Amino acid sequence: MRLCFFNEGRLGLVRGDVVHDVSDALDVLPAARYPFPRHDLLIERLPELRQRIDAVAGTRTVPVAAARFQSPVANPGKIVAAPVNYRKHLEEAIAEPETFSRAHVRQIQETGLFLKATSSLIGASEPVRIRHADRRTDHEVELAVIIGQRCKGVSRTAALDYVAGYCIGLDITVRGPEERSLRKSLDSYTVLGPCLVTADELGEPAGLDLALTVNGESRQMANTRDLILDVPALIEFASSFYTLEPGDVLLTGTPEGVGPIRPGDEMHARIDRLGEMRVRVELEAEGGAA
């Protein structure tokens, strides 16, 4: 199953080149009252929603080409990210001290994970808006994992049982000496899309080719088999520190080839069996509007 949010909050089921509007399925979700839950209600209820989604599909459709894709996860409690989790990216970071601060270039087992603000989250049809244009801003394509069940202290052998699905992620970053969480949490600096592919449809997350181009120029190309800590190991690592909740996003790290993006650029990201997305880059206008 491939799920998305599109056209101002409509829930969609993607089949081929058509998006089925299945927003009526959301009626079965409980009405939330303050204090609101700290996790994503749709992701939590996804196993029981699936039959309802299939039942209402087909009455209203739009072509994929005409849909404006928002983040496929609307309310993640947290975004957990893995730094330098590909060997060749670690090597390129070590080789470019003028770009990558020495304080931040260590083995992932030493560095640990970091958090990104949920306010940085956008979907594939929304532009990345560059702030601090006087500094270098880089693209980083990643496999994103969406947690489906509450878990803590999970072993790597059981880790994939707690995954709801996967999507393409872009972790945008401003280079500089500050902590990662600051430089990577700007508005629009986390892109998820184009849709959430459920774990049963994707299958094993190892062995997926991923690639990114900017204006048609190849920048990043790798395979998830090259991860230093693979998806089960990352879930084990993250859940040893955090309680992971439904809808939490785990960005698994980017491969070598990270490079600058500038206003006017277009990024094209793809991952095997997850699809592809084209994301525009704009300059954030004074006052915050793009």
Image: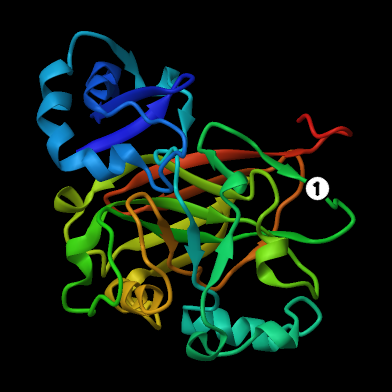
Work out which residue is located at the far front of the displayed protein and give it.
34
Residue hosting label 1:
131
- Percent across and percent down for residue 145 are 35, 58
> Could you tell me which residue is drawn at 46 percent across and 61 percent down?
142
Q: Residue 98, can we see it?
A: yes
Q: Please rate how many residues cluster around mark 1, counting C-alpha atoms within 10 Å: few if below 14, some from 14 to 19, many from 20.
A: some
In the picture, which quadrant includes the C terminus?
Answer: top right
Work out which residue is located at the far top of the displayed protein and give it.
59
Secondary element at tag 1: loop
- Percent across and percent down for residue 260 are 72, 59
- Percent across and percent down for residue 169 are 47, 53
Asked if residue 192 lies left or right of residue 151, the reply is right
In the picture, which quadrant includes the N terminus?
Answer: top left
Task: Report the front residue among 261 and 84.
Answer: 84
> Could you tell me which residue is drawn at 55 percent across and 78 percent down?
89
Dot 1 amino acid type: Arg
- Percent across and percent down for residue 203 are 16, 58
In the displayed structure, 188 sits above or below 26; it is below
Q: How is the image coloured?
A: rainbow
Q: Residue 216, can we see it?
A: no
Give the number of callouts: 1
> Could you tell me which residue is drawn at 43 percent across and 21 percent down?
67
Asked if residue 177 lies left or right of residue 65, the reply is right
> Could you tell me which residue is drawn at 25 percent across and 75 percent down?
154
Asked if residue 229 lies left or right of residue 130, the reply is left
Task: Report the front residue among 1 and 211.
Answer: 1
Asked if residue 238 lies left or right of residue 128, the reply is left
In the displayed structure, 186 sits above or below 264; it is below
